[in-house]
Amino acid sequence: MTRGFTVWRCMGCGAVLFPERLLCPRCHGAAFAPERVEEGVVEETSTIRHMIGQADWKPRVIANVRTKDGLHITVGLRDDSGPGTVIDLYEEAGAPFGVAKGSPPPTESPPAEPPP
Ligand SMILES: [Zn+2]
């Protein structure tokens, strides 16, 4: 789990992209500089209750998050942050995750269910 995650700023027009593209959708430039984004604001959340092909899927929450550059990304939420909450962003296996700003960093995986 790494603090922040990488986005790509177009060297031609300054657009911020995630994930990385071959060409900028705005100016068609092909040169990008990586930048770290460490926080965003939750705009909307939804819970994924089922996943095709996953028998023991645990419900998990994803959030649509807006960064300070106006980039919208989908992140996995590791707490119950709701719309309007500023969250700290982390990266795990190339995917962005978030917890409410100032919270301790999330663990590698959601906590295990206690044994019955
Ligand atoms: Zn561009």
Image: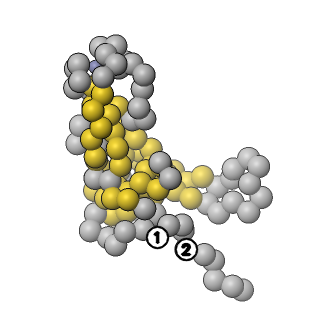
Instruction: Name the image quarter holding residue 85.
Output: bottom left
Secondary structure of the residue carrying numbered label 2: loop
Is the residue marked 2 within 8 Å of ligand 1, measured from its CB?
A: no
Total label count?
Answer: 2
Q: Quadrant of the N terminus?
A: bottom left
CB under 8 Å between discs 2 and 1: yes
Which is nearer the eye, 35 or 104? Answer: 35
Tell me, for residue 39, which label it has, or none: none
Residue 16, visible in the rendered structure: no
Query: As drawn, which residue projects farthest toward the top?
Result: 28
Residue tagged 2: 111
Instruction: Name the image quarter holding residue 47.
Output: bottom right
Residue in the picture at 46% in, 70% down:
107
Q: Position of residue 58 (x, y in %)?
A: 65, 63
Instruction: Name the image quarter holding residue 57.
Output: bottom right
Q: Residues within 10 Å of mark 1 (few under 14, many from 20)?
A: few
Left or right, 89 with respect to 77, comes to left
Residue 115's place in the image compared with 9, above or below, is below
Tell me, for residue 107, which label it has, or none: 1
Please name the amino acid that badge 1 sits on: Thr
Residue in the picture at 33% in, 63% down:
100
Residue 48's place in the image compared with 100, above or below, is above
Residue 113's place in the image compared with 78, above or below, is below
Q: Position of residue 35 (x, y in %)?
A: 27, 41
Please name the amino acid that badge 2 sits on: Pro
Q: Quadrant of the C terminus?
A: bottom right
Which is nearer the eye, 104 or 2? Answer: 2
Calculate the distance from the C-alpha at mark 2 to the C-alpha at mark 1.
8 Å
Is the residue marked 1 within 8 Å of ligand 1, measured from its CB?
A: no
